[in-house]
Amino acid sequence: MTVKGHKNNHFRFLALIVALLLVYSALPLIPFYSMEGADKAENNASAVKKLAGNQGSYFSFIVFGDNHSGLFLNDAVTLKEIWQMNREDRFRKVPIDIVLSVGDITLDGARGQFESFKKVQKLIKYPLIAAIGNHDDRALFEEYVGKPEFSFVNRNSCFIVMDNNHQGVSEAQFAWLEDELKKGQEYDHIFVVMHKPPFDPYQQDWYNIDNNPWAYRLRKLFAKYEVDMVFSGHKHMFKNENFEGVDYIVTGGGGMLLEIPEDDGGYLHYVRVMVNNDFVTYEVRKVSPPLWEWATYYFWKELVYWARNFYGSGYILGRNTKMEPLKITNLNDKEYWMTGKLESR
Ligand SMILES: [Fe+2]
């Protein structure tokens, strides 16, 4: 055999290995599509009941969001995340009591997508509590997951799950929330779960909430009642902020195809939170996509951003010297928000 023949054989062998790895990485989807989901009776209320007997001030919980079940690209990632979540208790140091979802549990609210989410729920070995997202149909959410707004207690901590599936937070919700925050004062910690973050996690984006009265009011209220952490999603990325002593975590990397560059927070992940008596810490667990999805999407996403950053986007021909007029004209500097209605999704 010639040297060239040897090289060809090596190349073929390598290509075969890569092809096998790609196929292997897609296999978990097969049992997922043929399995049964969790029963509808396993919902937010039944998950809260499971927490009743918990004792002690040391525990852990997991938060993820925007898995958007029902699209195979999303489900494939969520399956990988679940596999890692289910291993979180391997050191047996601290019990993991709950997994919280910050909403957008379905791609766009169809019944079949809720059925997919129930499979996700079944595969997660811890009790699951979910908030409603703007993509989740309200009636179906109540049918499959239960109430979208409630509070519960676990050990030394109070959890408030809020519904901001639609724009804003109503006066009735503010009244209810303040009442819950007052009741929460007797616990060491207060955690809030809601879909839309009450601030802009990513400035290069359409989501414009900083100037909205409901978001400002929420931030002030959370600070007043010394909330420990506010978890949200909506933006498909990771971002952490701290306003007036309150930690805000955006964890929207639970499955949906990400568009933001990895360096800016556009990576798949979930968050693990640890409550150590008086103290709370958290860690972000980055999860890489399955190999086939990396090869078909995530690799190219990063490459496009890399190319854009490296070569610029059109600056050789167009010098971008024109000042753009603001679309928002009625910003009220003194009170920080607009006096008119702000369109935001
Ligand atoms: Fe989403």
Image: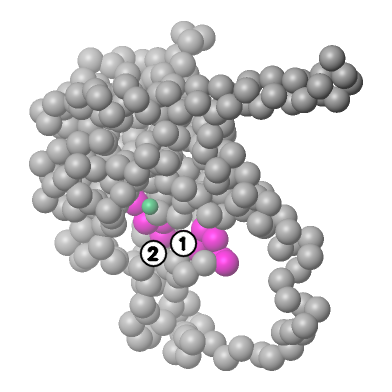
Q: Residue at x 79, y 65 (%)?
A: 311
Residue 106 at x, y percent in the picture: 28, 46
Quadrant of the rendering where the N terminus is positioned: top right
Q: Tell me, yes or no, whether the highlighted magenta stretch contains residue 252.
A: no
Q: Which residue is mark 2?
A: 215
- Dividing the picture into quadrants, the one containing residue 317 is bottom right
Around disc 1, counting alpha carbons within 10 Å, would you say few (fewer than 14), some (14 to 19), or many (20 or more)?
many
Q: Residue at x 77, y 25 (%)?
A: 8
Depth order, front residue of 101/186: 101
Q: Main secondary structure of the magenta part?
A: loop
Residue 54 in sight? yes
Tell me which segment is drawn in magenta. 193-204
Circles 2 and 1, Cβ within 8 Å, touching? The answer is yes
- Dividing the picture into quadrants, the one containing residue 217 is bottom left
Relative horizontal placement of residue 22, taking residue 133 as reference (left or right): right
**Vertical relation: 267 (above or below) 259:** above
**Vertical relation: 290 (above or below) 90:** below
Q: How is the image coloured?
A: one colour
Q: Which residue is mark 1?
A: 199
Residue 178 at x, y percent in the picture: 26, 53
Check disc 2 and report its element: helix, strand or loop.
helix
Q: Residue at x 23, y 15 (%)?
A: 53
Relative horizontal placement of residue 104, taking residue 291 as reference (left or right): left
